[in-house]
Image (spheres, rainbow, N blue to C red):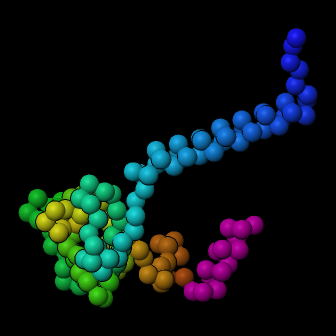
Amino acid sequence: MSLSVKPKHQRLVLLVIALVALVGAGLLAAWALRSQASYFYLPSEIVAKAPDPDRGVRLGGMVETGSIQTAADGVTITFVVSDGTARVPVTFAGIAPALFVEGSGVVAEGRMGADGVFVADNLLAKHDENYMPRELEGMSTDDVRAQIEATLQ
């Protein structure tokens, strides 16, 4: 005696197996990426509850005026990031972006040190809303519009 499965039931079984496999793959991917997520913190959030020292995070805020100091090695810089409520000291060893200046916005990617200093691996500087590409500097508004229109054609 052989068991035969109707084609309708066979499709239903295959659909259930595919759905279970898809959900399993999604859960496996989420579990694998959980340690790779980089959370964004404001200085007041880090002061209130600092993340684990081994956890990669992003610290965002404004670079305090007068806080940027370059170490004797010429590569390491220290500065303070503030959100108007709290201040977090940051150290970074590397080449800072050209737009990284005091009083501007910055996002520092790195880890919180046990000593309360944020150790940045990467800096992302934000330009102001008055940004102008070098190619368009010195042009009048009409010249800029003409240049843009010529580029689009």
Question: Residue at horizontal 33%, vertical 57%?
Answer: 56
The part of the chain drawn in magenta is 140-153
| Residue 91 placement (x, y as % from top left) | 20, 65
- For the residue pair 49 and 99, the one nearer the viewer reads as 49
- For the residue pair 42 and 51, the one nearer the viewer reads as 51
Question: Residue at horizontal 60%, vertical 41%?
Answer: 24
| Residue 34 placement (x, y as % from top left) | 44, 52
- Which image quarter holds the C terminus? bottom right
Q: In terms of image quadrants, where is residue 83?
A: bottom left
Does residue 93 appear anywhere in the picture?
A: yes
Q: Residue furthest front?
A: 1
- Which image quarter holds the N terminus? top right
Question: Residue at horizontal 41%, vertical 74%?
Answer: 126
For residue 37, side relative to residue 145 (left or right):
left
For residue 32, side relative to residue 113 (left or right):
right
Q: How many marks can you see?
A: 0
Q: In terms of image quadrants, where is residue 72?
A: bottom left
With respect to residue 79, does 20 lie above or below? above
Question: Residue at horizontal 86%, vertical 18%?
Answer: 3
